[in-house]
Amino acid sequence: MSAAEYRESLRRYQPVVYVEGKQVADVAGEPSLAPGVTDSSLRHGGMAAD
């Protein structure tokens, strides 16, 4: 699974996540979650960052 495929899987899964008391509509696109999403995408995708 590439990094892009991982991010797309987050969008399809639509997890319920809250940041500072507000629900996040797009976990993969939320700037405050970007470092964690990027790290996880690299771990799931080997090192196939894109």
Image (tube, grey):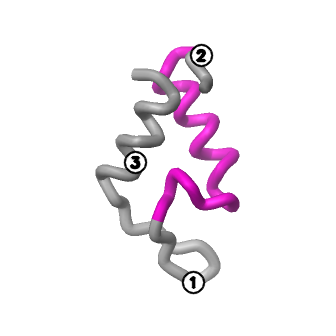
Instruction: Work out whether residue 12 or residue 44 is closer to the camera in this orientation and state it.
Output: 12
Which callout, 1 or 3, points at the residue further toward the start of the chain? 3
Quadrant the C terminus occupies: top right
What amino acid type is highlighted by mark number 2? Met
Q: Residue at x 60, y 60 (%)?
A: 30
Residue at the spot of label 1? 21
* Stretch of the chain drawn in magenta: 26-47
Q: Residue at x 46, y 69 (%)?
A: 25
Element on which disc 3 rests: helix
Residue at the spot of label 3? 10
Return the x and y of residue 32 as percentages of the image width and height: 69, 61
User: Given this view, does label 1 or label 2 mark the residue nearer the observer?
Assistant: 2
Return the x and y of residue 46 as percentages of the image width and height: 52, 15
Binning the other alpha carbons within 10 Å of mark 2 as few (below 14), some (14 to 19) or many (20 upward) gives: few
Quadrant the N terminus occupies: top left
Contact between marks 1 and 3 (CB within 8 A): the answer is no
Compared to residue 41, the image places residue 7 above or below, namely below
Element on which disc 2 rests: loop
Element on which disc 1 rests: loop
Cα distance in 3D space between marks 1 and 3: 20 Å
Return the x and y of residue 12 as percentages of the image width and height: 31, 50
Contact between marks 3 and 2 (CB within 8 A): the answer is no
What amino acid type is highlighted by mark number 3? Leu
Q: Quadrant of residue 42?
A: top right
Q: Quadrant of residue 43?
A: top right
Binning the other alpha carbons within 10 Å of mark 3 as few (below 14), some (14 to 19) or many (20 upward) gives: some
Instruction: Work out whether residue 23 or residue 26 is closer to the camera in this orientation and state it.
Output: 26
* Numbered-mark total: 3
What amino acid type is highlighted by mark number 1? Gly
Cα distance in 3D space between marks 3 and 2: 18 Å
Query: Left or right: 26 with respect to 31?
Result: left
